[in-house]
């Protein structure tokens, strides 16, 4: 009778352990984000992910085999528990010391650019050549198509990132265009940590947005905005700039790239920013047809301009505007 009870006890313990192992093996499903999508073009990351998946499968098998052995061992220990004498010694417990991260100063040269590409009407290869020639670290693009019939149903941000060699990019939709979308984009050599699309007051005209990416520039959190403002009226553009000014007020290190359609350069100051590459006392013609300085690069005081200019390469009715800066800041 004792032998039957003992065997029942062993079966009960084994079934209990098997149930616990199954319960611990189920993973929760990841949640999805409502923010804009951050894209990467790095093929090496995809290869690494595939390797990690294979390794994960192998590890799961190894874990299952190990856990089975542990279960058998624990059963044996249970049977022999009555013969074991345990002694304890009082040992002082040392609290773990948290690692202290010292603030780090970032001081490096960063090249920024903005380019209205006219939906690549003259060929994305020409646009890519102009970008590669300047090789900015971060560039804002305006008048960008994604899967639009007029531009051959091409995902232009993805294609330009590939052609010009940028590992990160985001697209900010302004309007639908047929079966596709039209708006602005950011290409970056630095990781984009997050992205959102903010609607701007657009009156009765074409809807306008501002894309907001948080970029890690050598570890320094930098807020990068890209936009294409309305051309209908100065008052509407000023309203849109004031909205962007409110966004900048909460940022320490920021960049604003875009086509501001500001035929009067004095209007640009409604952004309330620290520094403007295109300004009344020193302007670069970026709109070829009307010889006007309507594109701009706007930055916070942590950026100090080293050099600036425009690209004369043909590819759009706009010229690519660029500027190199010394960026200084502290990473917490």
Image (spheres, rainbow, N blue to C red):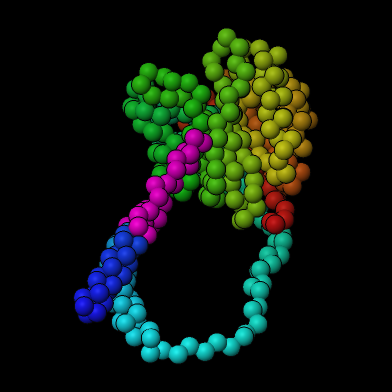
* Residue found at x 70% / y 57%: 332
User: Where in the figure is residue 129, as x and y percent of width and height?
Assistant: 46, 41
In reply to whether residue 36 is colored magenta, the answer given is: yes
Depicted 91 relative to depicted 233: above or below: below
Does 71 sit left or right of 133 as displayed?
A: left
Q: Specify the segment rendered in magenta.
A: 23-50
Q: Position of residue 238 (x, y in %)?
A: 71, 19
Q: Is residue 287 above or below residue 72?
A: above
Residue depicted at x 69% and y 56%: 331
Q: What number of labels is visible?
A: 0
Q: Is residue 206 magenta?
A: no
Q: Quadrant of residue 227?
A: top right
Q: Please tell me which residue lies in front, 254 or 327.
A: 254
Res. 38 in view: yes
Q: Is residue 139 visible?
A: no
Q: Position of residue 260 (x, y in %)?
A: 64, 25
- Does residue 105 appear to the left or right of 17 in the view shown? right
Which residue is found at the position 74% from the left and 22% from the top? 267
Quarter of the image for residue 225 reads top right
């Amino acid at each position: 009778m004792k032998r039957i009870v003992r065997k029942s006890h062993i079966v009960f313990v084994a079934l209990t352990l098997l149930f616990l192992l199954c319960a611990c093996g189920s993973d929760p499903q990841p949640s999805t984000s409502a923010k804009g999508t951050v894209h990467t073009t790095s093929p090496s990351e995809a290869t690494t992910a595939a390797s990690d998946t294979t390794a994960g499968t192998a590890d799961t098998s190894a874990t299952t085999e190990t856990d089975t052995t542990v279960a058998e061992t624990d059963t044996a220990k249970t049977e022999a528990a009555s013969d074991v004498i345990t002694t304890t010694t009082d040992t002082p417990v040392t609290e773990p010391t948290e690692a202290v991260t010292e603030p780090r100063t970032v001081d490096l040269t960063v090249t920024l650019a903005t380019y209205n590409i006219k939906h690549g009407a003259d060929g994305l290869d020409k646009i890519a050549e102009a970008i590669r020639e300047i090789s900015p670290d971060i560039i804002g693009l305006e008048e960008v198509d994604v899967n639009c019939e007029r531009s051959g149903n091409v995902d232009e941000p993805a294609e330009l990132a590939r052609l010009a060699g940028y590992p990160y990019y985001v697209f900010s939709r302004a309007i639908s265009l047929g079966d596709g979308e039209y708006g602005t984009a950011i290409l970056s050599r630095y990781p984009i940590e997050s992205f959102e699309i903010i609607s701007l007051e657009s009156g009765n005209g074409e809807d306008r947005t501002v894309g907001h990416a948080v970029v890690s520039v050598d570890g320094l959190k930098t807020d990068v905005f890209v936009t294409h403002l309305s051309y209908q009226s100065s008052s509407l553009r000023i309203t849109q700039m004031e909205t962007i000014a409110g966004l900048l007020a909460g940022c320490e290190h920021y960049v604003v790239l875009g086509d501001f359609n500001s035929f009067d350069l004095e209007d640009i100051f409604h952004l309330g920013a620290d520094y403007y590459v295109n300004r009344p006392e020193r302007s670069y013609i970026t709109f070829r047809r009307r010889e006007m300085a309507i594109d701009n690069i706007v930055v916070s005081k942590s950026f100090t301009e080293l050099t600036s200019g425009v690209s004369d390469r043909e590819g759009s009715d706009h010229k690519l505007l660029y500027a190199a800066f010394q960026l200084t800041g502290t990473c917490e």
